[in-house]
Amino acid sequence: PAWGVDEVFGAAQADEARWGHAVVAPGGVIYVLPLSANSVLRIDPNSDEVRSLGNLGGRKPKWVHGVLAKTGAIYGVPYSATSVLKISPFLGGSVETISNLGDGVLKWAYSALAPSGSIYGIPCYASSTLKID
C-alpha cells in the first residue's frame, strides 16, 4: 500500500516542544519523553489511546533521549532535568525520577545501552559520562 497519513488522533498540550524522543516498549506501546511537557506521553498503537503519565514539573527542557533497558524499563537521561527518568511499562507505565544529578542545563543529550546492560549518558555540556546500572 501507499504511505500516507491515515488519521490524526489524541489531544496534546498546545505549547512549545512538548515531547522529544519516543521509545517502543515490549508489547508495542510507545512512551515519549517530556521536553517542556509536564508528563510522559503514552501512545497505544493497538487502540489509538493517548494518555499523559506522571507530573514532572515545569523545568525544561527535561529529557531529550531515552533507552529501553534489558529489564524492560525505559530510562531518560537528564538534559536539564535534575534526575534520571524511569518509566516502568510493566507497572502500568509508572513514572518516577531517580538520583539527584544537580541543576545544570544541557547535561547529557543522548544515551546508549551497552551489552553489559548498563546505560551510558553521552555528555553534551556535562563534564562527565553518566552510567546507569
Image (spheres, rainbow, N blue to C red):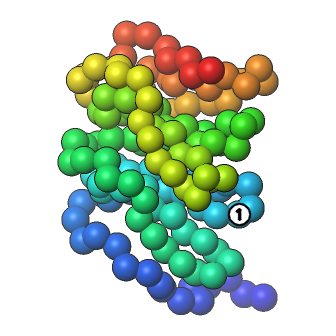
The x, y position of residue 102, in whole percent, is 28, 20
Left or right: residue 12 compared with residue 45: left
Q: As displayed, is residue 133 above or below residue 12?
A: above
Disc 1 packing (10 Å; few <14; some 14–19; many ≥20): few
Left or right: residue 36 compared with residue 19: left
Secondary element at tag 1? loop
**Residue sitting at the far front:** 91
Q: As displayed, is residue 85 above or below residue 25?
A: above
Q: Is residue 54 visible?
A: yes
Q: Is residue 21 visible?
A: no
Q: Quadrant of residue 101?
A: top left
Q: Residue at x 61, y 52 (%)?
A: 91
Q: Quadrant of residue 37?
A: bottom left
Residue that carries the numbered disc 1 in the rendered image: 28
The x, y position of residue 55, in whole percent, is 32, 53
Q: Residue at x 37, y 10 (%)?
A: 127
Q: As displayed, is residue 101 above or below residue 81?
A: above
Q: Residue at x 23, y 23 (%)?
A: 103
Q: As displayed, is residue 103 above or below residue 39?
A: above
Q: Give whichever of 36, 122 is nearer the camera.
A: 36
